[in-house]
Amino acid sequence: MTTKAKITTLDFFEKKAAHANRKEEFELGEDENGVMQTLMYHPTFSTKKRDALMKEFFHSVQFAAENEIEFFKTQEEEIMYLNFLIIKYFTDISKMLEGQDLYTHIEAYKKLYDSGYVEIIINEAFHIDEVAKVQNHYNVARQRMINLESELSQLADEANKNKGAQLRSVARKAQGGKK
Protein backbone atom coordinates (compact mmCIF):
# COMPACT_ATOMS: atom_id res chain seq x y z
CA MET A 1 0.00 0.00 0.00
CA THR A 2 1.42 3.38 -0.96
CA THR A 3 0.75 6.59 0.85
CA LYS A 4 -1.00 9.39 -0.91
CA ALA A 5 1.17 12.39 -1.90
CA LYS A 6 0.66 15.49 0.16
CA ILE A 7 0.97 19.05 -1.05
CA THR A 8 3.98 20.60 0.69
CA THR A 9 3.56 23.47 3.08
CA LEU A 10 6.13 25.83 4.58
CA ASP A 11 6.03 23.62 7.66
CA PHE A 12 7.92 20.94 5.71
CA PHE A 13 10.74 23.36 4.87
CA GLU A 14 10.80 24.76 8.39
CA LYS A 15 11.38 21.26 9.79
CA LYS A 16 14.17 20.61 7.26
CA ALA A 17 15.83 23.93 8.15
CA ALA A 18 15.55 23.18 11.87
CA HIS A 19 17.19 19.81 11.26
CA ALA A 20 20.05 21.47 9.33
CA ASN A 21 20.57 24.02 12.11
CA ARG A 22 20.54 21.67 15.08
CA LYS A 23 23.69 21.20 17.14
CA GLU A 24 25.30 18.25 18.85
CA GLU A 25 28.18 17.95 21.28
CA PHE A 26 31.56 16.48 20.36
CA GLU A 27 34.05 15.46 23.06
CA LEU A 28 37.56 16.72 22.34
CA GLY A 29 39.20 15.07 25.34
CA GLU A 30 40.26 16.09 28.80
CA ASP A 31 42.33 19.16 29.48
CA GLU A 32 45.36 19.20 31.80
CA ASN A 33 43.00 19.36 34.83
CA GLY A 34 41.02 16.30 33.80
CA VAL A 35 37.99 18.31 32.67
CA MET A 36 36.30 17.03 29.51
CA GLN A 37 36.39 19.67 26.76
CA THR A 38 33.49 19.65 24.31
CA LEU A 39 32.63 21.46 21.13
CA MET A 40 29.14 22.13 19.82
CA TYR A 41 28.81 21.37 16.11
CA HIS A 42 26.27 21.09 13.30
CA PRO A 43 26.09 17.49 12.04
CA THR A 44 24.19 18.69 8.96
CA PHE A 45 25.69 21.52 6.90
CA SER A 46 23.06 24.05 5.84
CA THR A 47 23.23 25.45 2.33
CA LYS A 48 23.36 29.01 3.69
CA LYS A 49 26.45 28.27 5.79
CA ARG A 50 28.13 26.34 2.96
CA ASP A 51 27.61 29.31 0.64
CA ALA A 52 28.96 31.75 3.24
CA LEU A 53 31.97 29.48 3.81
CA MET A 54 32.81 29.43 0.09
CA LYS A 55 32.39 33.18 -0.16
CA GLU A 56 34.80 33.67 2.74
CA PHE A 57 37.22 31.13 1.31
CA PHE A 58 37.56 32.87 -2.07
CA HIS A 59 37.61 36.30 -0.42
CA SER A 60 40.48 35.08 1.81
CA VAL A 61 42.44 33.75 -1.17
CA GLN A 62 41.98 37.05 -3.00
CA PHE A 63 42.89 39.11 0.08
CA ALA A 64 46.03 37.03 0.60
CA ALA A 65 47.08 37.53 -3.03
CA GLU A 66 46.44 41.28 -2.91
CA ASN A 67 48.32 41.67 0.38
CA GLU A 68 51.16 39.28 -0.47
CA ILE A 69 50.32 36.88 2.37
CA GLU A 70 52.31 33.71 1.75
CA PHE A 71 49.66 31.14 2.59
CA PHE A 72 47.62 29.94 -0.40
CA LYS A 73 50.56 28.98 -2.60
CA THR A 74 49.44 25.40 -3.28
CA GLN A 75 46.14 23.60 -3.70
CA GLU A 76 47.06 21.55 -0.61
CA GLU A 77 47.17 24.76 1.47
CA GLU A 78 43.81 25.79 0.01
CA ILE A 79 42.26 22.44 1.00
CA MET A 80 43.75 22.62 4.48
CA TYR A 81 42.30 26.12 4.94
CA LEU A 82 38.98 24.92 3.51
CA ASN A 83 38.93 22.22 6.23
CA PHE A 84 39.61 24.92 8.82
CA LEU A 85 36.67 26.95 7.49
CA ILE A 86 34.46 23.86 7.66
CA ILE A 87 35.34 23.64 11.35
CA LYS A 88 34.83 27.37 11.81
CA TYR A 89 31.42 27.47 10.12
CA PHE A 90 29.97 24.28 11.55
CA THR A 91 31.17 24.50 15.16
CA ASP A 92 31.02 27.11 17.90
CA ILE A 93 34.57 28.11 16.99
CA SER A 94 32.82 30.58 14.67
CA LYS A 95 31.84 32.62 17.75
CA MET A 96 35.49 32.86 18.81
CA LEU A 97 36.58 34.10 15.37
CA GLU A 98 33.68 36.42 14.60
CA GLY A 99 34.93 39.71 13.22
CA GLN A 100 38.57 38.59 13.16
CA ASP A 101 40.88 39.21 10.19
CA LEU A 102 42.62 36.68 7.94
CA TYR A 103 45.84 36.83 9.99
CA THR A 104 43.93 35.72 13.10
CA HIS A 105 42.19 32.98 11.12
CA ILE A 106 45.53 31.67 9.86
CA GLU A 107 46.93 31.63 13.40
CA ALA A 108 43.83 29.80 14.68
CA TYR A 109 44.13 27.34 11.81
CA LYS A 110 47.78 26.66 12.67
CA LYS A 111 46.88 25.99 16.32
CA LEU A 112 44.11 23.59 15.36
CA TYR A 113 46.31 21.88 12.79
CA ASP A 114 49.38 21.58 15.05
CA SER A 115 47.26 20.17 17.88
CA GLY A 116 45.83 17.53 15.53
CA TYR A 117 42.27 18.74 15.96
CA VAL A 118 41.65 19.66 12.31
CA GLU A 119 41.93 16.00 11.38
CA ILE A 120 40.04 14.79 14.46
CA ILE A 121 37.08 17.14 14.01
CA ILE A 122 36.85 16.68 10.23
CA ASN A 123 37.09 12.88 10.45
CA GLU A 124 35.29 12.12 13.70
CA ALA A 125 32.73 14.86 14.38
CA PHE A 126 31.46 15.51 10.88
CA HIS A 127 29.82 13.01 8.57
CA ILE A 128 31.89 12.40 5.44
CA ASP A 129 28.92 13.22 3.17
CA GLU A 130 28.60 16.69 4.69
CA VAL A 131 32.32 17.42 4.29
CA ALA A 132 32.14 16.12 0.71
CA LYS A 133 29.40 18.66 -0.10
CA VAL A 134 31.76 21.51 0.75
CA GLN A 135 34.73 19.91 -0.99
CA ASN A 136 32.64 19.30 -4.13
CA HIS A 137 31.47 22.92 -4.07
CA TYR A 138 35.14 23.96 -3.84
CA ASN A 139 36.16 21.65 -6.70
CA VAL A 140 33.39 22.95 -8.98
CA ALA A 141 34.17 26.60 -8.15
CA ARG A 142 37.90 26.06 -8.61
CA GLN A 143 37.35 24.38 -11.98
CA ARG A 144 35.14 27.28 -13.06
CA MET A 145 37.89 29.69 -12.04
CA ILE A 146 40.47 27.73 -14.05
CA ASN A 147 38.14 27.68 -17.07
CA LEU A 148 37.50 31.42 -16.80
CA GLU A 149 41.22 32.15 -16.52
CA SER A 150 41.82 30.06 -19.63
CA GLU A 151 39.04 31.82 -21.54
CA LEU A 152 40.33 35.24 -20.46
CA SER A 153 43.82 34.29 -21.56
CA GLN A 154 42.53 33.17 -24.96
CA LEU A 155 40.51 36.37 -25.33
CA ALA A 156 43.56 38.46 -24.41
CA ASP A 157 45.69 36.59 -26.96
CA GLU A 158 43.03 37.10 -29.62
CA ALA A 159 42.71 40.79 -28.73
CA ASN A 160 46.49 41.21 -28.97
CA LYS A 161 46.51 39.51 -32.41
CA ASN A 162 43.66 41.75 -33.59
CA LYS A 163 45.38 44.81 -32.14
CA GLY A 164 48.58 43.89 -34.01
CA ALA A 165 46.66 43.51 -37.28
CA GLN A 166 44.92 46.83 -36.69
CA LEU A 167 48.24 48.55 -35.98
CA ARG A 168 49.73 47.12 -39.20
CA SER A 169 46.70 48.33 -41.13
CA VAL A 170 46.99 51.83 -39.64
CA ALA A 171 50.73 51.86 -40.39
CA ARG A 172 50.07 50.90 -44.05
CA LYS A 173 47.49 53.64 -44.37
CA ALA A 174 49.90 56.13 -42.81
CA GLN A 175 52.50 55.16 -45.40
CA GLY A 176 50.02 55.86 -48.17
CA GLY A 177 48.95 52.30 -48.79
CA LYS A 178 52.45 50.95 -49.30
CA LYS A 179 53.25 47.43 -48.08
Image (spheres, rainbow, N blue to C red):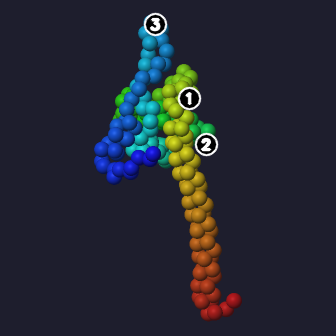
Q: From what the image shows, is residue 150 above or below residue 86?
A: below
Residue 49 can be seen in this image? no
Give the residue type that dot 3 points to.
Gly
Q: Is the residue marked by circle 3 packed among few (<14), some (14-19), or many (20+) residues within 10 Å?
A: few
- Numbered badge on residue 34: 3
Taking the spot 34% from the left edge, 37% from the top edge, the residue there is 18
Frontmost of labels 2 and 1 is 1
Question: Picture coordinates of residue 97 (x, y %)?
Answer: 39, 31
Q: Nearer the viewer, mark 3 or mark 1?
A: 1
**Disc 2 from disc 3: Cα separation:** 39 Å
Q: Looking at the rendering, in which quadrant would you find the N terminus? A: top left
Left or right: where 176 falls relative to 43: right
Q: CA distance from mark 2 to mark 1?
A: 20 Å
Q: Are marks 2 and 3 in contact (CB under 8 Å)?
A: no
Judging by the rendered image, the residue that carries numbered circle 1 is: 123
Q: Secondary structure beneath disc 2?
A: helix
Q: Which residue lies under the disc numbered 2?
A: 75
Type of amino acid under label 1: Asn
**Given the current orientation, which residue lies at the most extreme top position?**
33
